[in-house]
Image: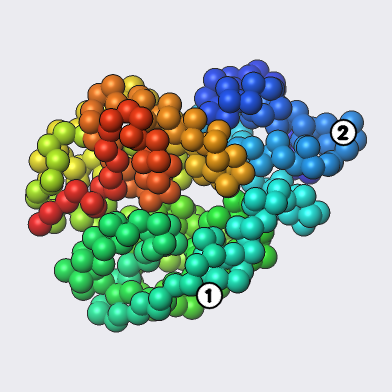
Amino acid sequence: MNEEVYHCIRCGFCTSKCVTLPEFRVESAGPRGRMLLLRGLAEGLLELNENVARRIFQCTTCDSCSLSCPAGLKLSGIFEKFREDLFERGLLPENLRKIAENVRKYGNPYGEISKAVEVRRGDVCLFIGCTTRFRREETLKRALEISEIFGWSLIEEVCCGSPVKKIGDLTLFTELMKKNYERLREFSKVVVLCAGCYRALSEDYRKFGINLNVSHITQELLGKFHEAEIERATYHDPCHLGRAFSFYEPPRELLKKSGVELVEMKRNRENSRCCGGGGGFRALHPEISRRIAMKRVEEASRVSEVLLTSCPFCHINLRDVSDEFGIRVYDVIDVLRM
């Protein structure tokens, strides 16, 4: 058990940031409660069982809680690390087990067969990612157009590994990492569309000694697009891009230079509200994930009729509830024109 569980001073500042705690309305479904569970396990006061395990998985890993921690604990990281132990012990919830099974069998969490796409153009590679490939046809089409315009190469991809790492399958994650490294190491730069892919290919791979030059597509397009199909919008910061890397300005600068009037929600940048979809939470609790997304979309609808983001998974979770608020949701690249 990680000794960091003893560094929690139980102040409860983290609870005000958590998006899952208000939905479950029990202490153990929030960050302080999870830390107390881990401490109870470490001290032999609790027995590790499916109920305890389920609480550890009832976290979107947005890491908003860590912003308020006076002890400086990276709470999501602690929970993610413990998930590896839960996975090894066979305590992975059934809905999440299906994700690992799909990735192992099909190379993606959606359990779909991918049409091989491999185009060699130059020494920059566009890594499309599973969610864009299988769930965002419009964004995929736009990404392929952009890759052709700028001469980016495409490879036959397997999952970046982010979904299985989040649920604790470290063995499968390392297998995927090695496969991707073999295919990506020849390129001078890897451009990604997804916040999860960005974090996996850069931060997570680096922890295993693999160093790739990773860039988000909004960084690459800055200054290269000067028109947009919309005039006014608000922007949602993906947790695994924003809070994880303080990656806030490139998407905003890209939109502003493309003529978009950008209006901010009350909670933006490091204080951005999680969409409710990450860390396996959408698969585990789809209806609660939907309720969390509704709160974010409702906040966006107060300031704009258009909501933009730069992560396909956030896009899907937010778009699924957008009709109830009369707001349109797009990926940033969906609205850009040369």
Q: On the image, which quarter does residue 212 sit in?
A: bottom left
Question: What residue do we see at 35% from left, 35% from top?
Answer: 322
Residue under numbered circle 2: 46
Local packing at callout 1 (Cα closer than 10 Å; few below 14, some 14-19, many 20+) is some
Sequence-first tag of 1 and 2: 2
- Regarding mark 2 in the picture, which secondary structure is present there? loop
- Furthest residue in direction front, as rendered: 324
The residue at 13%/46% (across/down) is 228
Work out which quarter of the rendered image holds the N terminus and state it.
top right
In the displayed structure, does residue 182 sit left or right of residue 280? left
- Residue 243, position as x, y percentages in the image: 44, 38
- For residue 181, above or below residue 46: below
The reply to whether discs 1 and 2 touch (Cβ–Cβ < 8 Å) is no
Q: In this view, does 134 lie to the left or right of 176?
A: left
Q: In this view, does 53 lie to the left or right of 141?
A: right
Question: Is residue 338 visible in the rendered structure shown here?
Answer: yes
The residue under label 1 is 179
Kind of element beneath mark 1: helix
Residue 151, image x, y percentages:
21, 73
